[in-house]
Image: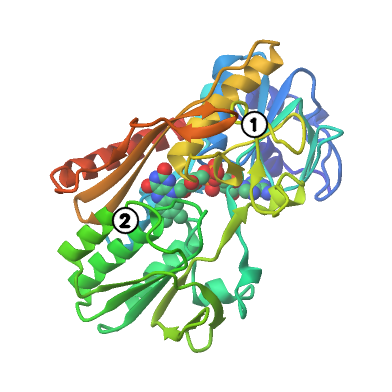
Amino acid sequence: MTLNRRDFLKVVGGASSLALAGCAAQAPAVSSGSAAEIMPKTGRRVVVVGGGYGGTIAAKYVRMMDKSIEVVLIERNDHFVSCPFSNLYLGGLLPDLSSLTIKYDKLIANHGIKFVQAEVTGIDPAAHVVITDKGRLKYDRLIISPGIDFRTEEIKGYDAKTPEIMPHAWKAGPQTVLLRKQLEAMKDGGTVVISVPLAPFRCPPGPYERASMIAWYLKHNKPNSKVIILDANPDLVSKGALFRKGWDMHYKNIIDYRKAAKVTEIDVGKKAVLIEGLDEVRGDVVNLIPPQRAADIAVKADLVGDDKRWCPIDANTFESKKHKDIHVIGDASIAGAMPKSGYSANSEAKVCATNVVRLMNGQPVMSLSGINTCYSYIAKGEAISVAAVYAVKDGAIIAVPNSGGVSPADWSQAKTEAIYAESWLKNILTEMSS
Ligand SMILES: Cc1cc2nc3c(=O)[nH]c(=O)nc-3n(C[C@H](O)[C@H](O)[C@H](O)COP(=O)(O)OP(=O)(O)OC[C@H]3O[C@@H](n4cnc5c(N)ncnc54)[C@H](O)[C@@H]3O)c2cc1C
């Protein structure tokens, strides 16, 4: 099947798209699923997989630091929806997901990045080739930031249709919209069950922010309703004291937090979840967040460690400990003390891009200096945060002692932090999309 004009435009982008479009007649024919080359490699090339929090920034920074390196960004979608702030949409504080959605046009045009909209189906580390459903691409170095997928096999009764009834909404988009619709359709006096998997998972404070935002919505729209949090962990895994304080202030009779409550089995028909060694809990709405691992492509490409979950990397370059010249950043990587957050992915992308450029130019690599802040909304206009700076010690990423902390316990900064949070989101999405 020859590429039609629309498909062709999907695989080129940025400043070079005009030049390439000009010689479209000489472009190689690419068969769906074939191993035909999408764009022949003529000079030094970095391929980036994943156009989310990590991948957009890695692609941009490689180009910003060395224009002589060609950068090809591969992403399955033509847009990206941010998980950060998607809980506010669930709480009815955002009308839709449009303010959380970015397109890639400006990013690729401003930095001369080539964009391929395709599904990456394999990586051949020995041949330095990425295989996609549109054909293959050669690279000198590959950076992947593909995010997460789920270990659903650990929940008895879970199948491909489960998320249509019990949405996870842990990748923002249609799942988030479905969960919101279920909340809107629920009767007053209903019960929302949120199940939190064992850590590590994407966004440690995320489930507790979600509970807060759903409780906010219920308090103001369906005041006889409840939120039951079934947390597989021994206690809240992030900002525990602050969340408890916020819930006490705002949602005393709404949020019922249960620790060490690991969901091991479900009955989708009954909208019931079973807790290991304990009872069955039924919900009118069940937000089942399954245990997580690195995204499928990282597992398929043998980039994960022995437990088949997360990708071991060098703490300064993010180069895979499994395969040379492949770098893994963001949620998929084992980044020591850095949490699986969008801010961490952004910070890791900058360090990784810098060191990829240095390695390609025969220069010494820099030591990681990382940063993260995670804001969580408790109520409309009230947020809390946790922040830290990260460095490498004895080969591992550690939080620099006394470099950060959490919001003051007296709630004195909660309103200011909500303003900071909004500003953070605006800045980071702008950085990713321009
Ligand atoms: C409810 C919620 C709230 C959150 N709130 C915050 C917050 O306030 N602050 C914060 O810092 N973080 C937050 N996070 C965490 C944040 O969303 C993630 O940590 C961040 O998205 C990780 O970036 P990433 O680049 O690793 O993955 P992603 O941003 O998910 O990007 C991965 C990209 O790779 C693409 N991809 C994957 N596989 C393939 C393939 N085979 N072929 C082609 N493309 C592929 C995907 O389509 C996707 O676009 C939150 C998460 C959730 C769920």
Where residue 192 sits, quadrant-wise, is: bottom left
| Image height of 433 relative to 98, above or below | above
Label located before the other in sequence (1 or 2) = 2
Q: Residue at x 22, y 63 (%)?
A: 247
| Image height of 149 relative to 8, above or below | below
Pointer 2 residue: 240
Amino acid at pointer 1: Asp
Whether label 1 touches label 2, CB < 8 Å: no
Amino acid at pointer 2: Gly
Element under disc 1: loop
Q: Is residue 289 left or right of residue 401?
A: right
Where residue 115 sits, quadrant-wise, is: top right
* Total count of labels: 2
Q: Looking at the image, can residue 186 be seen? A: no
Q: Position of residue 304 (x, y in %)?
A: 70, 47
Q: Looking at the image, can residue 353 be seen? A: yes
- Label 2 C-beta lies within 8 Å of the nearest ligand 1 atom: no
Q: Residue at x 56, y 63 (%)?
A: 291
Pointer 1 residue: 314
Q: Colour scheme of this structure image?
A: rainbow
Q: Nearer the viewer, residue 131 or 268?
A: 268
Q: Position of residue 365 (x, y in %)?
A: 62, 17
| Image height of 142 relative to 80, above or below | above
Q: Position of residue 77 (x, y in %)?
A: 59, 48
